[in-house]
Image (cartoon, rainbow, N blue to C red):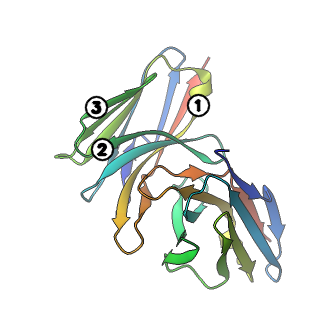
Amino acid sequence: DTEVTQTPKHLVMGMTNKKSLKCEQHMGHRAMYWYKQKAKKPPELMFVYSYEKLSINESVPSRFSPECPNSSLLNLHLHALQPEDSALYLCASSQQGRTEAFFGQGTRLTVV
Amino acid sequence: SQQGEEDPQALSIQEGENATMNCSYKTSINNLQWYRQNSGRGLVHLILIRSNEREKHSGRLRVTLDTSKKSSSLLITASRAADTASYFCATDRYSSNTGFQKLVFGTGTRLLVSP
């Protein structure tokens, strides 16, 4: 299984809502990532988890809260988002010692 | 910012033609990778070239790397309509704290291949 699975594929939420994005991989990768991508822009790193511990937080606002319950799952909890947070949110994973990243298909988030 | 620049931003060609896109980066690297992204979807890893390599081939893809100029190019030969996508270069920054790499993507080239 060489897939990274993200759910949901699309999400529309109000600014007062709380929602979660989910990511799952069964490749045994011990690093997992969240990226944010705005239209016609490159992906920008948000968080890195290695061995289920948060390793990198790229100064992301606290309304985004990552969680890594186990080595296969990565969540991104969303609360009190702003319309400018609307974007494609991409999850990725990689194997230690390898630099190639495997990406999920993303969650298209719209904040209204 | 370590973010690389790619040019052209957009490229439109006919099927059968070759497509060349270029990437420049700012810091020293271990590897440089190229990824492809179909419209609004996830990225797919295409090829990795190490800093001590100058050229690499994979099927219809040819990648070159010039570390003295901090630049790389991706050539797609005999393009097909199915090659229509955005192409991103990515450089890695290794973190000794975590033992994992952090990918920084270039600005991307949008390729349109017309039948």
Residue B99 relative to residue A84: left or right: left
Circle 2 sits on which residue? B50
Considering depth in this image, is B88 or A30 the residue closer to the camera? A30
Circle 1 sits on which residue? B84
Disc number placed over residue A58 in the picture, else none: none
Comes first in the chain, label 2 or label 1 = 2
Assign the C terminus of chain B to one quadrant of the image.
top right
Q: Find residue A50 and report its horizontal and vertical position in percent.
A: 52, 70
Comes first in the chain, label 1 or label 3 = 3
The local secondary structure at tag 3 comes to strand
Considering depth in this image, is A15 or A74 the residue closer to the camera? A74
Relative to B26, is A68 above or below?
A: below
Mark 1 → mark 3, Cα distance in angstroms = 23 Å
Relative to B76, is A10 above or below?
A: below
Quarter where residue B29 is shown: bottom left
Disc number placed over residue B55 in the picture, else none: 3
Q: Find residue A74 and report its horizontal and vertical position in percent.
A: 67, 68
Residue B3 relative to residue B29: left or right: right
Considering depth in this image, is A13 or B46 the residue closer to the camera? B46
Q: Amino acid at mark 1?
A: Thr
Q: Amino acid at mark 2?
A: Arg
